[in-house]
Amino acid sequence: MELSEKTIETNYHLFLKKLNELGIDVTALNEKYGEKIKHGTFSNSSEYGLAGDGTFLEVVLKTLTPFAINLNNMFEGASVDKQTLIKVCLLHQISKCIRLVKNDNQWEVEKRGLMYKYDADQPSLRTGLHSVAMCVECGIDLTAEEIEAMTVNDRDLTDEQARWHSGLMASILRMASELTYLKFKN
């Protein structure tokens, strides 16, 4: 997926605006990780068109979050707070923006489609847990329910606790993530 610099800038400003509207002070996040979030990739592989400069925010803002909101709307009376859901959607994978760096191995890029690789200098944490750590580092408060949702995709699908006993927000986020990949796969 190729995006213009204007689209990348617009998406980043929308990301910051949405977080501000949720009452989140984004000063530290912007200063420490702003450029990396702005230009982050959603995926390391070119397989579904989700890899590329700025694709992280493009996908999170325009596909994943709308899927999550639509799924949440299906649970009339039992739905989760929409603002909290949006917060988690926007933040649950931000660590991808610092974990995935351009792959300079031409063979891997050409033969395997691995346009990005994992940065060996980053901690060996799963994406959701690393995103939680980034939020804590930047002064963004998270509830236990938000942390559960942000880390649900880190868990193995055979994890019975995560699969059957997660809260509604975690389940919605897992489904929205799956639908996002399905949309681009098809």
Image (cartoon, rainbow, N blue to C red):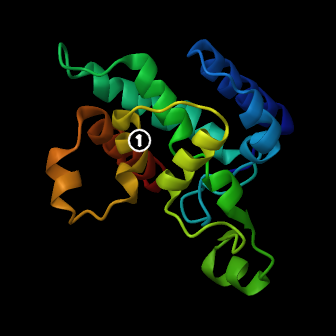
Q: Which of 38 and 178 is in front in this view?
A: 38
Q: Where is residue 88 in the image (x, y as percent from the top left)?
A: 47, 33
Q: Is residue 31 above or below residue 96?
A: above
Q: Residues within 10 Å of mark 1 (few under 14, many from 20)?
A: some
Q: Which residue is drawn at 35% across and 50% down?
A: 152
Residue 14: quadrant of the picture: top right
Q: Which of 67 and 150 is in front in this view?
A: 150
Q: Residue furthest right?
A: 5
Q: Which residue lies furthest to the bottom in this view?
A: 107
Q: Which residue is drawn at 38% across and 31% down?
A: 68
Residue at disc 1, secondary structure: helix
Q: Is residue 86 visible?
A: yes
Q: Is residue 186 above or below residue 69?
A: below
| Three-letter residue code for mark 1 | Ile
Residue 69: quadrant of the picture: top left
In the figure, is residue 65 to the left or right of 135?
Answer: left
Q: Where is residue 28 in the image (x, y as percent from the top left)?
A: 75, 33
Q: In this view, does 36 lie above or below 86?
A: below
Q: Position of residue 135 (x, y in %)?
A: 59, 40
Q: Residue at x 40, y 58 (%)?
A: 154
